[in-house]
Amino acid sequence: MSTAHPTALSFRNAVEADIPELVELVESAYRGDASRTGWTTEADYLEGQRTDADGVRQVISTPDSVLLVVERAGELIACCQLEHRGDHAYFGMFAVRPGLQGGGLGKEILAEAERRARTTWDAKEMRMTVVNVREELIAYYVRRGYRRTGELSPFPYGDERFGVPLRDDLAFELLVKSL
């Protein structure tokens, strides 16, 4: 008999069978009208896809990389990528179902991802890149201890695997946090 609280979160590494649902989750959190239900939408900046089955498969199959699946009561509600890169870990592909955003899930998931990076890989720092015009999202991470580095990398204009930009001033800003 399970003694787990029915609203408790469970975390596991994604497997091949999860790919279709993970693609749907990530797309719903960032693109199209469905994403407007939550606050993490990129629909005003980017159209097209956020990821596809091949992109998710690559994260799952890359050595020193995991895609954490977050479930509550057996339902897949969120995911995030963790990748070991030497003395630090990279955090990406973070998605929470749009209707569940704003209730503290993201904060709890981020804390678990940081804990896993520390304990699994002895990572000293967590790094992520965020689209530079996403001020509300950047502020969210700053409130959780990340700092803006001012280091920008170019947005991959012309590579539709990352979406179709609706503006010409997009770049990725590096955020870091000591663990």
Image: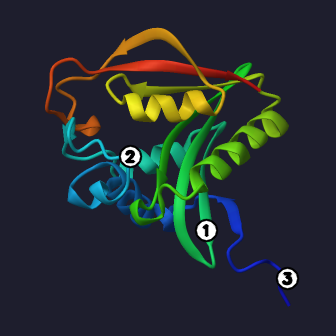
Amino acid residing under circle 1: Glu
The residue under the point 21% across, 58% down is: 33
Q: Which residue is mark 1?
A: 71
66 vs 117: above or below:
below
Circle 1 packing at 10 Å, graded few (<14), some (14-19), many (20+), is some
Q: Which residue is mark 2?
A: 40
Q: In percent of the image, x 70 and y 66: which residue is there?
A: 10
The local secondary structure at tag 2 comes to loop
Direction top: furthest residue: 150
Is the residue marked by circle 2 packed among few (<14), some (14-19), or many (20+) residues within 10 Å? Answer: many
Vertical order, 113 against 127 (above or below):
below
Q: Helix, strand, or loop for circle 3?
A: loop
The answer to whether marks 3 and 1 mark residues whose Cβ atoms lie closer than 8 Å is no
Quick one: label 3 or label 2, which is nearer the N terminus?
A: 3
Instruction: Give the camera-side residue of 169 and 70.
Output: 169
Up/down of 43 relative to 37, above or below: above
Chain-order first, disc 3 or disc 1: 3
- Front position in the image: 177 or 24: 177
Residue 59 coordinates in the image, percent (x, y): 51, 43
Label 3 – label 2 distance at C-alpha = 33 Å
Residue displayed at 41% across by 65% down: 99
Dot 1 falls on a residue whose secondary structure is: strand
User: What is the quadrant of residue 19 in the picture?
Assistant: bottom left
Which of the two residues, 85 or 142, is positioned nearer the viewer here?
A: 142
The residue type indicated by label 2 comes to Thr
Q: Which residue is mark 3?
A: 3
Write the residue at 47% across / 25% down. 129
